[in-house]
Image (spheres, rainbow, N blue to C red):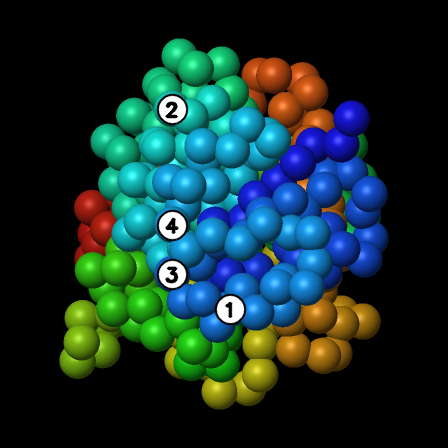
Amino acid sequence: MSLKIGIIGMGVISKFYVFALQNKLNDPLLTAVCDLNVERLENFNDSEVLCFSNYHDLLTREDIDAVIVNVPNDKHFEICRDALKARKHVCCEKPLTLTLKEAEELVAISREMNVTLFTAFHRRYNIHFVQAVEMLTSKEEIAAVHASYLELIEEHAGEDKWYLQPERCGGGCVADNGPNVFDTLSFFLGKMRVQAANIIRDEHHVDIKASIQLITNSDIKVHVELDWGYLHGEKKDVLIMLKNGQKIYVDMLEEFPEFKSSLYHEYEQILLDFKRQIELGNCHGEAGLDAVRLVQETYETENLKI
């Protein structure tokens, strides 16, 4: 039987889930949608998809197996917690939570209830990134890595103005984009720790730019550059420098000229991997937790020199 999914929160990212579920995949099956703003549900009024304005009502449905949590960052913990306790498998948009303590609690609940807790790190599924990682035979051949995640946040936020409210976003580019970059790197480099960070904030205390130095457990040096005020379109890339002098460059937006068009194939893979992790039964939020740890370390090591 198909995995029946409900989406909680129909903001700017929801369209990528909906497109994949309604146009690309037969399983999982989009069963319900939920948003406080009922206008966002109007496209589903004439369909078989159930509509809710209160996520608690959605969670009581026995015919819904799993939920996608796509709400402002400050609501992730509460809704994920309630969904896990309702024995629903959870796919949460990054970051998993705003604090390490909250992430640890969700991981514990996921294990206790024996349901999947999965974080939607879409860049690990980018076709160009996947092809680049397949070129590597071992981490031992890597000398250093540089990753950039540059954008103009107003273009990406759309109607979701909470991105620019630090108390809701968690800070700014470090809290929101940091987890995506950290996961992309950890995916092929393994465990990392932050050594130093330089963060620039605007007048509203939103961190809009950051330069972060990390190191892996095998002593590979990693540099991450984040920017929410990038005026030259969008840049999402990874440069892998090998010990033999060769370089592997990954432009995640290559062949995706339209704004956010790379997300369509990435979010399709998120849904397929979410279903796969549910079937395996051993995913309890570990990747999301580790990304939250690195965000916390970034803020804690701000302005340290190495």
Find the distance from the CA under tag 2 to the CA under tag 3. Answer: 21 Å
Find the distance from the CA under tag 4 to the CA under tag 2. Answer: 16 Å
Name the amino acid, label 1: Arg
Q: Residues within 10 Å of mark 4 (few under 14, many from 20)?
A: few
Would residue 194 be seen by someone viewing this image from the given angle?
no
Q: Secondary structure at mark 3?
A: loop
Q: Which residue, as the protein is rendered here, is positioned at the far front?
A: 46
Is mark 1 in CB contact (under 8 Å) with mark 3?
no
Residue drawn at (76%, 72%) of the image: 256
Give the residue number, with chain letter if any, for mark 1: 40
Q: Please tell me in which quadrant of the rendered image residue 177 appears.
A: bottom left
Give the residue number, with chain letter if any, for mark 2: 85
User: Reading the chain from its start, which is encountered first: label 4 or label 2?
Assistant: 4
Disc 4 vs disc 2: which is toward the camera? Answer: 4
User: Reading the chain from its start, which is encountered first: label 2 or label 3?
Assistant: 3
Image quadrant where one finds the N terminus:
top right
Give the residue number, with chain letter if any, for mark 3: 36
Q: Residues within 10 Å of mark 1 (few under 14, many from 20)?
A: some
Left or right: 226, with 134 as reference point: left
Left or right: 126, with 73 as reference point: right
Disc 2 vs disc 3: which is toward the camera? Answer: 3
Left or right: 125, with 222 as reference point: right
- The spot of residue 20 in percent (x, y) is 74, 54
- The spot of residue 227 in percent (x, y) is 42, 71
Find the distance from the CA under tag 4 to the CA under tag 3. Answer: 7 Å
Q: Secondary structure at mark 4?
A: loop
Give the residue number, with chain letter if any, for mark 4: 54
User: Reading the chain from its start, which is encountered first: label 1 or label 2?
Assistant: 1
Would residue 27 be seen by someone viewing this image from the given angle?
yes
Q: Nearer the viewer, residue 159 or 152?
A: 159
Q: Secondary structure at mark 2?
A: helix
Find the distance from the CA under tag 1 to the CA under tag 4. Answer: 13 Å
